[in-house]
Image (cartoon, rainbow, N blue to C red):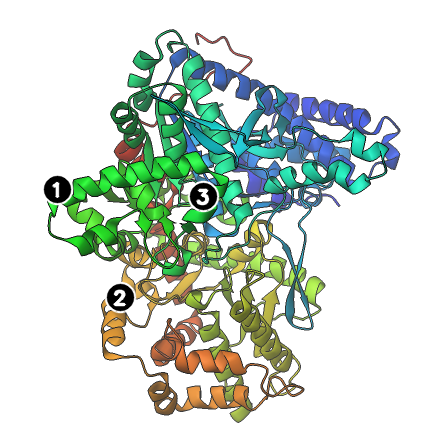
Amino acid sequence: MAKTDDRRKQISISGITTLENVSGLKLGFNRHLHFTLAKDRNVANTRDYYFALAHIVRDHLVGRWIRTQQYYFENNPKCIYYLSLEFYMGRTLQNTMINLGLESSCDEAMYQIGLDIEELEEMEEDAGLGNGGLGRLAACFLDSMATLGLAAYGYGIRYEYGIFNQRIKDGWQVEEPDDWLRHGNPWEKARPEYVIPICFYGHVHHSKNEAKWVDTETVLAMPYDTPIPGYLNNTVNTMRLWSAKAPNDFHLHHFNVGDYIEAVLDRNIAENISRVLYPNDNFFEGKELRLKQEYFVVAASLHDIVRRFKASKFGCQDNLRICYDTFADKVAIQLNDTHPALAIPELMRILVDLEKLHWDQAWTITKNTFAYTNHTVLPEALERWPVQLFEKLLPRHLEIIYEINQRHLENIKSLYPDDEQRLMRMSIIEEGVEKKINMAHLCIVGSHSVNGVARIHSTIIKDQVFKDFSDIEPVKFQNKTNGITPRRWLLLCNPPLAALIAEKIGVGFIKELDQLQKLHAFVNDGVFVEEIMSVKMTNKIKLATLLEKEYGIPIDVSSMFDVHVKRIHEYKRQLMNCLYIIVMYNRIRRNPNKPFVARTVMIGGKAAPGYYMAKLIIKLITSVAYVVNNDPVINNKLKVIFLENYRVSLAEKVIPATDLSQQISTAGTEASGTGNMKFMLNGALTIGTMDGANVEMAEEAGENNLFIFGMRVQDVEELDNKGYNATQFYEKIPELKQVIDLIAGGYFSPDQQDLFGDILTMLFHHDRFKVFADFESYMESQEKVNQLYQNPHEWAKMVIRNIASSGKFSSDRTITEYAREIWGVEPKVLKIPHPNEPKDN
């Protein structure tokens, strides 16, 4: 299918099309296609075309990648190492074309060949190596670090299977494996020359002045490198993901005697470490395989970091103690939540056991090197590993943690000599029926900086969750409000909006998102208001076509696209949204001829496989959707769609088409959120609580430009102190009572009347997130939404104000703050010379 002139206009800001570029791309495309197929192009399929295009784009990356690494070696800057168990990268092709300024040329080349570049882009598998916000944040950060010219490396695990594919069968979530590598990955480069042995189990042998970890079992860590290009600056950083390999692939003697399973058993056990991403949704499970994953990635990464440090141009391999004095001046390691916390005792093991530094010197280096980002205040999400498991799996690290804790407690005791309770609260080792290691405490003690990811979240961890620690070291605690990369979340996913903005204020906003403030001048510009409305309608039509094809549900594009997409969890309160859907359903049923603001409600997200309540919530949503969508009285006034298998590539289609973004977590529970920022940037209005980054969004845009409802953090605390009685709200709010009675009576589950009994029991007796308490305020706010939506021009003006106020929420701003205030480096505007240019230019 040939591309349209509109498509060509929209991507014109993504690079300059030249005849030379197009000709070279066409030549390279055909060369790669021929090389891949070794046969006539006429038999190629769409996937072959995608791989050919991916390889020619990758060719443009490689020279920049090599030159960037040469530049780092020659200039020896301080390096930033971002350790994360998750990197939710999504697709790579289009993002790479945009950052290299090749999208226009590639689009034109494919057009001349007779191919539709959008069709080729759809062939790429999502790299779903993350559960949600934490992993997607890491991906945005890598983009920003490259764009800001920081010498940065991302370290994680190359999971063979990413976050599971979600299928909805009979209304229930069913998990299927995400075999994202089955067709190969054109963006990665295996680096077998840097394979690292990783040890587990064994025991510790102590002699006079040293400890040796002996009789261990070994797994090999094989690195795979993925290039991370900055935006139009020729910088290409590296994400290195580790894959577990067995040291002995095959036991021939077992095979020869017919024991075929035993012949490969060790290999399977070893490689299980990187087999699958743990889909743990804010709930900690102390499983041995997960601990193996956490140690595997930090041990491999730290070995690699130390190797890089020693091999640096100005490094010293003769007198290692002198070298290590400068270690923290040249190395900054950011721990993305507690998952890589084992990096702290592992670096101590390297420095003390292997490099023979004194403990105090090693500890100073370690603390000055590490910084810790906290991502949750939910107690069930905080990692607490059993000491017994550590003793079995990582005996030397347990000894080091005990030593760290003893010295830490001695310091606390010197400050508070008579406060035994404080010692217990602040200990890294938690006493009890089962001794456990508090990994958050380990991170705080072993880092020079601790930050939350939104101002309200940072206040909560400083004043409540980790108050004892902040009382002693208040300067250590910082805030770094999250951000999103505007390259993917505007330029890539919403080209018509990006083109319209560029037409009004120029293209500077792509790297300096604060420039969006210039759009405030156009709020009352009637032509611009109409153009904003037209862009939104274009995106809605495109999404409606996709959804109708996928679900067979006709969608009224003039209806409000009301979207609630995020992981399914009680604190994110998809239940509240579902209850309000039933309220709207009841209102239409009562007065079918009364005017009603039509809505298409979309809810999407995955529930962790072991999270029963979340999966039951999905079943309730899909059951309500079935009733609503098949009731002839409702007609087109209300449609409900559960977006199956929500992922990055689907988000890129849904977010630009959204009118109303639901961000309705209980105040004080969402650390930040980044979906809220993506919707704001793409012209959706927010209905939400004063939680996470919503608070700062309301400050930037003005609270009157969001639909804020519900309790604030202090209100939640007061209700907790008073005692939350859900029945009072049930009896007080007639429409809520009617909804609950319908669910209890089996209206949405006629074949099993008590199917949703556990949801009702939770709502009345165990609801930590207080759905009923906020419900009346939620309904009132929804009425304000309906009133404004009936005035399209006023709605569009509020949309413009939100877009114009979203500049703060760029990950470029976030990373600039990390760089200056935590890592001690300065972002560079320097553009590394193109590979075709001399280095000294």
Mark 3: few/some/many CA within 10 Å (<14, 14-19, 20+): some
Q: Give, as a three-letter code, the residue at label 3.
A: Phe
Quadrant position of the C terminus in the picture? top left
Residue 641 in the image: state x and y as whole percent: 60, 69
Task: Relative to 138, say whether 366 is above or below.
Answer: above
- Tell which circle, 2 or 3, labels the residue nearer the N-terminal end: 3
As measured in the structure, the alpha-carbon distance from the residue carrying label 1 to the one carrying label 2 is 35 Å
Task: Relative to 130, say whether 837 is above or below.
Answer: above
Q: Give, as a three-letter code, the residue at label 2.
A: Val
Residue corresponding to mark 1: 414
Q: Give, as a three-letter code, the residue at label 1.
A: Ser
Which structural element holds mark 2? helix
As measured in the structure, the alpha-carbon distance from the residue carrying label 2 to the one carrying label 3 is 37 Å
- Horizontally, residue 546 falls left or right of residue 321, namely right
The disc placed on residue 390 is 3
Residue at 58% x, 86% y: name it. Answer: 754
Residue 533 visible in image: yes
The reply to whether callout 2 and callout 3 are in contact (CB within 8 Å) is no
Residue corresponding to mark 2: 713
